[in-house]
Amino acid sequence: MRIKLHHVNLCTTDVPAMSEFYRDVLGLEGEPALEQTRVVSQGYAGKVGFLTDGDTQIHLAERDLGVAFRTGHAINPLERGHIAFRTDDIAAFKQRLTDKGIPFADYGAWAMSGWEQIFFQDPEGNIIEVHQVRS
């Protein structure tokens, strides 16, 4: 099982201003193709800006305090943001969490078409996403 840092998601009330800041100050470029893969019918239709440095992405998501309630999950990845890793074996990673007694929220292919996503917390309550791209 391979795992690699994929993106950092920051939550905001002003996606355009945050996007402008990261483009202007850090010189990040937009990832408009990602907008086409969003799934908005599953509980999150908020604004999102997708930026990249060419390797790692920054997702700037409109804060949504109700996502966990609407989806029936204990973890809300759009309250404070999260750090995300991509894996090539989500089933093995779920088993790893289960073996270690770490609870996780299995969102499935929820926000991005073809991305099977799970979310869990580190000991300080920071949210971590692990996802696998399904073809």
Image: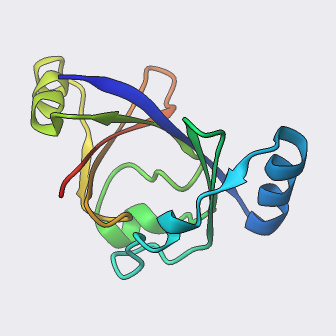
The residue shown at (37%, 63%) is 112
Residue 67, position in %: x, y? 44, 66
> Who is closer to the viewer here, 81 or 53?
53
The residue shown at (15%, 22%) is 96
Q: How is the image coloured?
A: rainbow
- Residue occupying the far bottom of the picture: 41
> Who is closer to the viewer here, 73 or 40?
40
> Who is closer to the viewer here, 76 or 21?
21
Q: Quadrant of the C terminus?
A: bottom left
Going by the image, does 34 lie left or right of 20? left
Going by the image, does 134 lie left or right of 64? left
Going by the image, does 119 lie left or right of 34? left
Residue 70, position in %: x, y? 37, 72
The residue shown at (40%, 61%) is 68
Residue 94, position in %: x, y? 16, 33
Q: Is residue 73 above or below residue 6?
A: below
Q: Is residue 75 above or below residue 73?
A: above
Picture quadrant of residue 71 = bottom left
The residue shown at (85%, 63%) is 17
Picture quadrant of residue 88 = top left
Residue 15, position in %: x, y? 73, 65
